Every structure is written in C-alpha cells, then in structure tokens.
Image: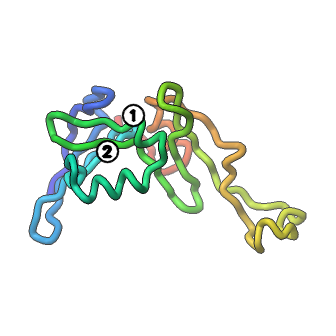
Amino acid sequence: MAEKVITCPNCFNDKRCFEDTQEVEGKEFNSYMCFNCGFTSNSTYEWDSQELKKAQLGSSQLMNDISFYDEERKLMWFPSVLNMGKLGVIYPDGVQNNWNYKLAEVRKLTELEIKDDKYDGHDSILDVDNAKTYGQYEFLDACREMGIIKDLD
C-alpha cells in the first residue's frame, strides 16, 4: 500500500526511519525499520501478544535487554539481525550498557580448512571472529559495507 518516513521513537532520526503499510489477509499490517539505529518493529508486537512473546523467545538476551516499548504506537521495538546469506549477517553484540552492531561476512575456506572435519565439507563460513564493529547509530554504514544499500539521503 504505502511507505512513509517517520521519526524514529528510539534515536529520533527523522530521515532514515520508515513505516511500510500492507494489507495481509484482509488486515492492515505495518512494519517499521530505522536505518540509523537499526531498530525494527511491526504491528503484531503489541504488549502481551503471542507474536511479541514468540519474538522475545527467539531473540538473544541482549536484544531483549535493549528492546523498548513505543508508547505512541503501543509496540515493542528490537535491534535488527539482518541475515543476507552469502553477503553476511549484521547483528547486535555486547551487553545492555555497552553494545554495538557487528558485520560478519562470509569467507571462503582455505584448502587446508576444507579438509578439516570441523567444517563438515563446507567451502565457506560466516567469519564471526573477524566481524567489523559499528556503533549503535551506524546501522546504515554496516548495510552499505555489506553492499545492500547505496544511499538513502
């Protein structure tokens, strides 16, 4: 249906936060994504909803610790985990009062590593050990580095 720019309820950025409205099974569904702070939500994450409980159970301790309740929309927001397959994964890392985003890229294994049983015949891995670090308000930079965004401005 429509996408519009909104002010992020987390970082208050008014240029990089988007609300997308779609019709799903005859009902309006809203999804939210801030490319400044990386927080996301949707209209099913209402307080005490089954969808929110499922999201909380599927989230890391850190994601639950830094999630927040949006009073205006009556929804919980979480930091994003963005898995783009062969391009890698952007994820929050750290503890509640000291966290950042990481970009772990996929790298090819060496011939020697491929022969190692611990890699179970794979030829590439998600290189978490060498993940790049981005600040709490540098989610867009991580997306650019991953190669999925050219520019929003």
Q: Residue 62 at x, y = what percent?
A: 48, 39
**Residue that lies at the very extreme toward the bottom in this rendered image:** 121
Q: Residue 97 at x, y = what percent?
A: 49, 25
Circle 1 sits on which residue?
A: 37
Quarter holding the C terminus is: top left
Q: Residue 140 at x, y = what percent?
A: 44, 38
Horizontal placement of 26 versus 109: left or right? left
- What distance separates the C-alpha of mark 2 from that of mark 1? 9 Å
Q: Is residue 95 above or below residue 89?
A: above
- SS for callout 2: strand
Residue at x 29% of width, y 38% of height: 17
Q: Residues within 10 Å of mark 1 (few under 14, many from 20)?
A: many
Specify the quadrant of the image occupied by residue 38: top left
Horizontal placement of 13 versus 116: left or right? left
Horizontal placement of 32 versus 113: left or right? left
- SS for callout 1: loop
Q: Which mark is residue 15?
A: none
Q: Residues within 10 Å of mark 2 (few under 14, many from 20)?
A: many
Specify the quadrant of the image occupied by residue 151: top left
Q: Is residue 70 above or below residue 111?
A: above
Circle 2 sits on which residue?
A: 33
Q: Amino acid at mark 2?
A: Met
